[in-house]
Amino acid sequence: MQIETQTSKRTTLKLLCVVCGMFGFGFALVPLYDALCDLTGLNGKTKGQYVVDEQVDEQSETDVSSRRVKMQFLASNNADMPWVFRPVSRSLSVNPGKLNATEFFVHNPAGRTIIAQAVPSVTPFRAARYLHKTECFCFDQQKLVGGESMDMPLRFIIDKDLPEDIKTITLSYTLFDITEQISGELAVTN
């Protein structure tokens, strides 16, 4: 009987440790995921907003590489997102170190106002650390009334230290309808 009691106590202690470990791991998942995304570029995580001198058009030749890199742009909608969403240019040939600009077109054909959020992704994943967005529609939520259209700007720089074996970078965005989430948050705060 004493052996069974000791075994039960050990088993209970082990299970309690497992439960505590799982609880702690659950809290650690968000920072671990963020660190993984920062490291690999997963989910388009880049080094954040990149501040550029206003005199970018007058960059010295030493700041810009003569190398050319192909930038591809993709756009897709999440399920139930009725907007038309596409890049104005599907690809650009860019020089690392130089500021580049393009736009994405959106149109809301629905008969109601919709608020959207674009989520970026970069491939190859290791190229994300060399892609610096100075202006991006993905930084903010986009609101269009029914029938409205607009071109959303994207300005970026590819770092000159981009590994030589990376010849093409694909920047893709998925557009999500977050109208109900925003409406719910507004209802709670009012």
Image (spheres, grey):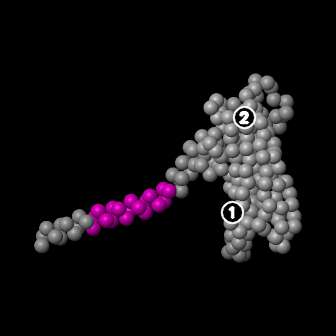
Q: Can residue 50 be seen in this view?
A: no
Provide the secondary structure element on which disc 1 rests. loop
In this view, 38 is above or below 177: above
At x 48% / y 56%, what residue is drawn? Answer: 28
* C-alpha span from label 1 to label 2: 29 Å
Across and down, in percent, residue 154 comes to 78, 47
Q: Is residue 116 magenta?
A: no
> In the rendered image, which quarter is residue 131 located in?
top right
Instruction: Give the number of the disc on residue 160.
Output: none
Residue at image coords 71%, 72%: 180
Q: Quadrant of residue 41?
A: top right
Judge by depth and name the residue closer to the eye, 145 or 139.
145
Task: Give the residue type that dot 1 points to.
Answer: Asn
The spot of residue 118 in percent (x, y) is 72, 57
Image coordinates of residue 56 in percent, x first then y, are: 82, 34
Q: Write down the residue under mark 2.
A: 69
Residue 13 drawn in magenta = yes
Residue 129 is drawn in which quadrant?
top right
The residue labelled by disc 1 is 78
Towards the viewer: 26 or 173: 173
Task: Specify start and end residues of the magenta stretch as a single range.
Answer: 12-29
CB atoms at circles 1 and 2 under 8 Å apart?
A: no
Label 2 SS? strand
Name the dominant secondary structure of the magenta segment. helix
* Residue 147 image offset from top left, x and y in percent: 87, 67
Query: If you read the primary sequence from the N terminus, does the residue marked by circle 1 or circle 2 appear first?
Result: 2
